[in-house]
């Protein structure tokens, strides 16, 4: 026979286990989320279980924008390769280096190994998607120049933030962190243009790298003013997008450096 105290303890334990099972059912991760975590999120096995919901949402937004930007960069590389009449392997190669070249150089300079795109399947899936869309719908994609320009602009904003934050988290001084943010955003395009025998876009004509540097400086300012992380990131991306759009709309360019011989 159980005493009254033992019965109370057993009842409490039974209620606790029922509540625990009920909570697990409510908070069980969906299939789509599990697939996303496995294929796309780097170091998915080390995912922290203590993140708040708002932080998870912020991280997911940045991750998805990162993959979209990667796919758009790959598309721009494939289109450039097509204009140079390269074969399929050449087009795929140019698409890959355009999409991940900046992040790879950044990680190597920071001593982060393995580099980010080697830690999951997400970047390879994004690049493959961009290549296949361009290959099968090249005429449609070629007509979407404005849309691609918009996503490209969003991409460089997101890449700038990712590179900047990674450098700051590693203890790099702010000035170098700004350079790392710019590196993430523009080096892939530099490699693309160099391999296709073009003068890199950031060295002439458009305001590109300057927009990334300006946005990164504002990020540091907002961080010093203790803005919430999500607000800081959105404002920084917005500043980079605004600078890019205004420079194209009003044909604002950096003065050309000329020597007497030129």
Image (tube, grey):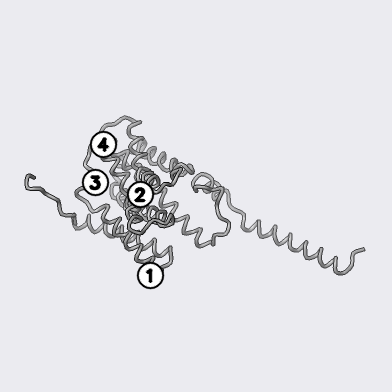
Task: Categorize mark 2 by other alpha carbons within 10 Å: few (<14), some (14-19), many (20+).
Answer: many
Task: Categorize mark 1 by other alpha carbons within 10 Å: few (<14), some (14-19), many (20+).
Answer: few
CA separation in Å, label 2 and label 4: 20 Å
Task: Categorize mark 4 by other alpha carbons within 10 Å: few (<14), some (14-19), many (20+).
Answer: some
Q: What secondary structure is marked by label 4?
A: loop
**Which quarter of the rendered picture does the C terminus lie within?**
top left
Whichever of labels 3 and 2 marks the residue nearer the N terminus, that label is 2
Residue at label 4? 196
Q: Residue furthest right?
A: 1
Task: Categorize mark 3 by other alpha carbons within 10 Å: few (<14), some (14-19), many (20+).
Answer: some
CA separation in Å, label 3 and label 1: 34 Å
Whichever of labels 2 and 1 marks the residue nearer the N terminus, that label is 2
Q: Nearer the viewer, mark 2 or mark 4?
A: 2
Q: Is residue 200 above or below residue 177?
A: above
Residue at label 3? 201
Residue at label 1? 225
Q: What secondary structure is marked by label 3?
A: helix
Residue at label 2? 184
Q: What secondary structure is marked by label 2?
A: helix
Q: Position of residue 242 (x, y in %)?
A: 28, 60
CA separation in Å, label 3 and label 4: 12 Å
> In the picture provided, is 124 more to the left or to the right than 30?
left
Depth order, front residue of 69/113? 113
CA separation in Å, label 2 and label 1: 25 Å
Which residue is depicted at the point 40% across and 68% down? 227
Which residue is depicted at the point 35% across and 39% down? 95
CA separation in Å, label 3 and label 2: 15 Å
CA separation in Å, label 1 and label 4: 43 Å
């Amino acid at each position: 026979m159980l005493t009254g105290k033992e019965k109370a303890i057993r009842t409490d334990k039974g209620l606790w286990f029922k509540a625990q099972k009920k909570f697990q059912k409510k908070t069980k991760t969906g299939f789509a989320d599990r697939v996303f975590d496995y294929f796309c999120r780097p170091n998915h096995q080390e995912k922290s279980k203590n993140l708040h919901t708002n932080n998870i949402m912020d991280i997911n937004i940045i991750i998805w924008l990162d993959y979209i930007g990667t796919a758009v960069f790959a598309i721009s590389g494939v289109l450039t390769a097509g204009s140079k009449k390269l074969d399929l392997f050449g087009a795929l190669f140019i698409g890959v280096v355009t999409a991940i070249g900046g992040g790879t150089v950044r990680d190597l300079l920071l001593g982060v190994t393995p580099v980010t795109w080697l830690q999951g399947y997400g970047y390879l899936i994004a690049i493959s998607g961009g290549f296949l869309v361009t290959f099968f719908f090249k005429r449609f994609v070629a007509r979407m120049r404005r849309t691609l320009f918009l996503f490209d602009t969003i991409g460089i904003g997101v890449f700038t933030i990712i590179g900047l934050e990674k450098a700051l988290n590693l203890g790099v001084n702010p000035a170098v962190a700004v350079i790392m943010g710019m590196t993430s955003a523009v080096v892939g395009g530099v490699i693309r243009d160099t391999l296709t025998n073009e003068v890199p876009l950031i060295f002439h004509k458009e305001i590109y790298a300057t927009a990334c540097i300006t946005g990164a400086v504002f990020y540091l300012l907002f961080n010093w003013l203790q803005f919430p992380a999500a607000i800081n990131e959105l404002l920084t991306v917005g500043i980079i997008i605004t600078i890019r759009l205004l420079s194209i709309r009003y044909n604002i360019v950096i003065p050309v450096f000329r020597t007497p011989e030129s």
